[in-house]
């Protein structure tokens, strides 16, 4: 790129052609005041504060929108520039209400700060504020557009970063303000309450609605969001050990840039609820009563050791959590494997994808682990299957929307429902639920027939393509068309978009949790190998992860069949290495997974269970059955932050700390490991989970006391492949890929990746008794089962009812209207909900949002998949619907 | 009395004509304004969908330009010039007379949706001052009797409807 030389404030500077004067100055640490500029937004030149003077031409120009020209002699702070800036600020202040004393923005107000810097106190102008109605009906955002200075940052953030388009300029002149379509209140607009506009607003025009505290926080610490798997970096403000404010971190290079979602921004008020667990509890005479840590931990270690002695280690199980940190998951599985001696260790990440993702792990052996979302914008074509990240993992959704709308990358959407992704898709394939497998096979078959495959890639890195394409050519396309409900023409137009392209696959829970999940995953891997779409740079796989440390928990061996570093337990070499490191003998047999734990507890074979940070009763179907199974245990320990359905059944409850109250690290869905320190202290006597585990470990005879988090990190980085950077405790690092396969190996030698044999769906019978397919999914306001988000005051007062969505036609046939109560019944259970008719919904398919009413929707599913499939099948189920009589 | 019912088929035809046009928003809005006399608020969402932009952006453009209106206007839109030349030549009296004749204030539409009275900064026909426009027709060198004749002429039209 061409370099340009100029002077700014007398300093000789070179920069790339096309750089704005403002950025050129910024790169050289010359500060120019701005109000409307933001590094993540396109420059707008709205506030004019960044004016500078060119001594050569004498021109005064807005530096944010003026590119550098050779030999400019820029002055940023001449007396005339200063005079102009002061006048701009005076005019803004004349138009601004004099309400600083009651303004939430307080000392964070950029207008006030710049006025102070320029020495503007009294403005000597007649005040002419343009009063607008204050809007604060929703529980998230207060809009006081009287304070708006028309910098347009909120509008640009809305259009360029989160791509919701809820607001734009309305009217003109002095009446101009950002407004929603039809000037509706935010809660009736398309606004998703991501709060990005709130964080970016320079004045108090947009502020978060805080009920407990109004004003500037006294302490701000950056940390990682504790909700979904995107791992957004937060700046958390606190006052008196209470979290009062959450914003996206100002750092560069974070996954979320300046964005967040409604959960990250507004739902963390759940941490301040009074009902947090604050002391250890022991069941005495049937009641949980507070005891000292000493007593509680003594009891746990004694009982664990005696149960191990009496029944053997295989009668004990450990259920960790993908919400807890990397360090904690490592200690937790080590306690199971070393102190007790069992592989009965798991976490609920199994439900949200691990059962399917392990197929990929088995194939790639540690390769393709880094999946930076930023690379989605470099993709040639996006192939989105069963994923609606706009609701489930919103920040990932922003990436997809930007790639599609701003980079014009073709996006193929495969989803039975018309989701929020639809407007951003080039082609929507509304297939029959769980027929993804057949569609992918068909696409591979069409592409093979057209000769559209990467022969070079296949020859170099794979094996078994011959057998695979032989079976492809025998595929009966009419059968596929019948099973998927898609015409051959539709499939061919998808193949046309994929043809000759490097594909970025975005896979969500529609595939990860469906009945044919593993088979669909195999088919996708075949398609990826065939098209040479593996190896990063905007090709390969991007998975939706619902929980913040799903990847990290798996990496730390919180699984019955994997050792830390995702090493399969059956493999002798790796197991021997861990045996030497831990100085124990490890069983080569797969332990009990979470579902088997419940089954074994039911049979009375499991005697003790230690649950860390999971609300098992709520996350699984049939709470009564789970509760009965757990009651069978001789000893049941739960470590959590909130009292919930599961802690009520425990013999010992240990109060842990939330992510904001401890040190630790999470690995996000990109393979980015981010470490953080505590923002506030745990409430009452609650302690960081790793401390509790370390204490328990010592009591149970672990030879190495973990006195600090550094010691745990040292051990992980020494032993766990991919994590050697953790010991340096950097803010973040990318997980190392260490596959021996030729494709992932820098020396380009090593093993080849084998194509999987073609799998197909079995024929399905019509189920006339259950005419509807119920698809279960998340809304952006709740995460997972909703144990935490339902405690948020803001989410609570938004009063979502979680209505079931049904198509207009089906609704009419059932004789139901909006708001009617219905019973939805599957062969396994039934629930009651209100219903909502949707014009755009497809007939025959209903949508039930998760996390409402104690997450009762899980009752529609069987606990274990009777067909014995690997996949979990918690995504969709056949149901019938009946209208409840109005009583 | 209600404004003319919107012919949704016609609106759909206009929208379809511009579907996926890059920079097609203003030509589309002009067509809608021309045919219906205003931009029906219910058309904002389908217009946005057709052009692959956000409804708020459509509204932003509609409310920015004085040539677009979100409210139905009268059959005859009268625009009285308030430019300097017209002012000197007695434009203010013409406006006062119009207000009295039509019983409307600036920016108002008669309840029977026959007339809308507006003012403009300059019609660019200063040599004819004082001037006004009725829909697309110019009327210049106005005097009170002439204004009465014009109003009567359009008023007669009304009875023929």
Image (cartoon, rainbow, N blue to C red):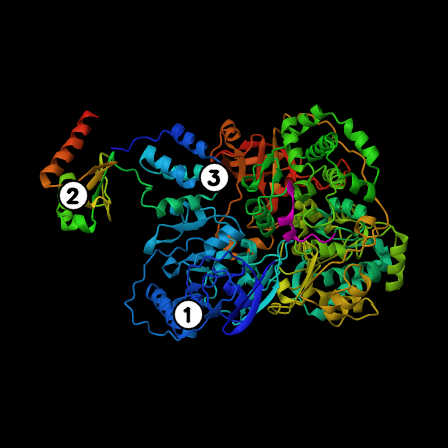
Q: Which residue is mark 1?
A: A112
Question: Could you give the CA–CA distance between mark 1 and mark 2, rounded to whole angstroms?
Answer: 47 Å
Q: Disc 1 vs disc 3: Cβ atoms closer than 8 Å?
A: no
Q: Chain of mark 3?
A: B
Residue A567 located within the stretch drawn in magenta: no
**Rendering coords of residue A853 (x, y %):** 57, 46
Please give the name of the residue rendered at 53% of the width and 29% of the height, measured from the top-left corner. A810
Q: Which residue is mark 2?
A: B99
Total count of labels: 3
Q: Secondary structure at mark 1?
A: helix
Q: Secondary structure at mark 3?
A: helix
Q: Secondary structure at mark 2?
A: helix
Q: Which residue is mark 3?
A: B51
Which residue is more in the foreground, A408 or A612?
A408
Answer with mark 3 or mark 2, whichever residue precedes in sequence: 3
Magenta highlight range: A369-386
* A260 vs B63: above or below: below
**Rendering coords of residue A230 (x, y %):** 63, 54
Question: Could you give the CA–CA distance between mark 1 and mark 3, rounded to whole angstroms?
Answer: 40 Å
């Amino acid at each position: 790129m061409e370099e340009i030389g100029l002077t700014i404030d007398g300093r000789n500077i070179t920069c790339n052609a096309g750089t704005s004067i403002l950025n050129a100055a910024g790169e050289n640490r010359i500060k120019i005041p701005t109000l409307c500029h933001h590094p993540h937004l396109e420059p707008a030149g709205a506030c004019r504060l960044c004016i500078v003077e060119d001594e050569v031409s004498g021109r005064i120009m807005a530096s944010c929108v003026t590119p550098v020209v050779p030999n400019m002699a820029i002055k940023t702070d001449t007396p005339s520039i200063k005079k102009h800036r002061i006048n701009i600020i005076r005019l803004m202040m004349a138009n601004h209400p004099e309400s600083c004393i009651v303004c939430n923005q307080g000392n964070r107000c950029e207008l006030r700060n710049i006025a102070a810097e320029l020495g503007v106190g009294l403005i000597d102008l007649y005040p002419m504020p343009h009063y607008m109605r204050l809007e604060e009906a929703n529980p998230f955002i207060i809009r006081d557009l009287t304070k708006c200075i028309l910098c347009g940052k909120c509008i640009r953030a809305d259009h360029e970063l989160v791509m919701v388009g809820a607001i734009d300029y309305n009217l003109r002149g002095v009446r101009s303000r950002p407004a929603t379509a039809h000037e509706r209140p935010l809660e009736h607009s398309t606004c998703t309450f991501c709060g990005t506009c709130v964080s970016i607003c320079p004045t108090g025009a947009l502020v978060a609605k805080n009920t407990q505290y109004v004003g500037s926080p006294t302490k701000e610490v950056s940390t990682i969001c504790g909700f979904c798997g995107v791992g957004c970096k937060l700046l958390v403000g606190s006052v008196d050990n209470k979290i009062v404010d959450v914003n996206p971190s100002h750092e560069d290079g974070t996954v979320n840039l300046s964005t967040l979602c409604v959960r990250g921004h507004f739902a963390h008020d759940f941490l301040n609820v009074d009902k947090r667990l604050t002391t250890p509890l022991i069941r005495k005479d049937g009641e949980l009563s507070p005891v000292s840590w000493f007593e509680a931990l003594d009891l746990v270690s004694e009982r664990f050791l005696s149960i191990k002695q009496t029944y053997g280690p295989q009668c004990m199980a450990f259920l960790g959590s993908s919400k807890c940190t990397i360090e904690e998951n490592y200690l937790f599985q080590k306690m199971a494997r070393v102190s007790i001696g069992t592989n009965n260790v798991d976490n609920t990440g199994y439900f949200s994808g691990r059962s399917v993702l392990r197929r990929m792990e088995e194939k790639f052996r540690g390769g393709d682990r880094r999946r930076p979302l930023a690379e989605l914008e470099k993709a040639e074509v996006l192939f989105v299957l069963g994923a609606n990240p706009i609701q489930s993992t919103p920040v990932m959704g922003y990436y997809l929307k930007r790639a599609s709308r701003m980079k014009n990358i073709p996006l193929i959407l495969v989803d039975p429902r018309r989701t929020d992704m639809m407007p951003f898709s080039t082609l929507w394939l509304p297939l029959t639920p769980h027929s993804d497998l057949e569609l992918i096979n068909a696409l591979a078959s069409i592409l093979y027939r057209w000769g559209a495959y990467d022969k070079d890639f296949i020859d170099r890195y794979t094996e078994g393509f011959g057998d695979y394409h032989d079976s492809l050519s025998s595929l009966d396309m009419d059968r596929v068309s019948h099973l998927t409900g898609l015409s051959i023409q539709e499939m061919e137009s998808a193949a046309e978009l994929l043809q000759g392209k490097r594909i970025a696959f975005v896979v969500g829970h529609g595939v990860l949790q469906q009945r044919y999940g593993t088979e669909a995953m195999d088919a996708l891997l075949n398609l990826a190998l065939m098209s040479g779409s593996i190896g990063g740079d905007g090709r390969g796989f991007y998975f939706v992860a619902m929980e913040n440390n799903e990847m990290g928990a798996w990496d730390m061996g919180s699984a019955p069949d994997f050792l830390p570093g995702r090493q399969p337990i059956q493999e002798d070499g790796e197991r021997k290495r861990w045996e030497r490191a831990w100085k124990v003998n490890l069983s080569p047999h797969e332990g009990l997974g979470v579902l088997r734990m419940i089954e074994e507890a039911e049979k009375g074979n499991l005697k003790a269970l230690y649950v860390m940070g999971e609300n098992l009763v709520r996350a699984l179907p049939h709470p009564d059955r789970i509760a009965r199974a757990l009651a069978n245990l001789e000893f049941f320990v739960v470590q959590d932050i909130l009292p919930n359905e599961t802690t009520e059944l425990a013999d010992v409850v240990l109060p842990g700390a939330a992510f904001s109250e401890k040190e630790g690290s999470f690995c996000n869905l990109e393979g980015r490991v981010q470490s953080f320190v505590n923002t506030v202290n745990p409430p009452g006597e609650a302690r960081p989970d790793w401390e509790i585990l370390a204490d328990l470990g010592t009591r149970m005879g672990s030879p190495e006391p973990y006195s600090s988090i550094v010691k745990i990190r040292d051990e992980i980085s020494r032993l766990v492949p991919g994590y050697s950077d953790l010991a340096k405790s950097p803010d973040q690092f990318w997980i190392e890929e260490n596959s021996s396969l030729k494709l992932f190996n820098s020396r380009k030698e090593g093993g080849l990746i084998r194509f999987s044999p073609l799998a197909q769906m079995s024929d399905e019978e019509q189920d006339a008794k259950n005419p509807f397919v119920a698809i279960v999914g998340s809304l952006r306001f709740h995460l997972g089962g909703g144990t935490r988000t339902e405690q948020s005051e803001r989410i609570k007062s938004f009063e979502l009812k979680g209505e079931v969505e049904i198509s207009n036609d089906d609704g009419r046939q059932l004789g139901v209207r909006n708001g009617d109560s219905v019973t939805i019944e599957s062969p396994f259970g039934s629930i009651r909900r209100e219903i909502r008719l949707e014009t755009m919904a497809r007939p025959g398919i209903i949508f039930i949002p998760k996390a409402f009413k104690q997450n009762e929707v899980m009752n529609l599913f069987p606990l274990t998949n009777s067909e014995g499939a690997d996949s979990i099948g918690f995504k969709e189920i056949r149901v019938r619907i009946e209208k409840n009589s109005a009583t | 009395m209600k404004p003319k019912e919107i012919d949704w088929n016609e609106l759909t035809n206009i929208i379809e004509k511009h579907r996926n046009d890059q920079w097609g928003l203003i030509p589309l809005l002009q067509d809608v304004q021309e045919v219906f006399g205003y931009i029906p608020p219910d058309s904002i969402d389908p217009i946005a969908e057709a052009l692959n932009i956000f409804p708020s952006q459509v509204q932003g453009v509609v409310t920015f330009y004085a040539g677009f209106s979100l409210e139905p206007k009268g059959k005859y839109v009268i625009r009285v010039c308030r430019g300097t030349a017209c002012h000197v030549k007695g434009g203010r009296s013409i406006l006062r007379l119009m207000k009295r004749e039509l019983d409307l204030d600036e920016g108002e539409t008669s309840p029977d949706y026959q007339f809308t009275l507006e003012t403009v900064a300059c019609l660019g026909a200063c040599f004819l001052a004082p001037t006004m426009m009725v829909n697309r027709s110019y009327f210049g060198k106005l005097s009170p009797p002439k204004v009465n004749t014009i109003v009567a002429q359009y008023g007669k039209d009304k009875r023929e409807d």
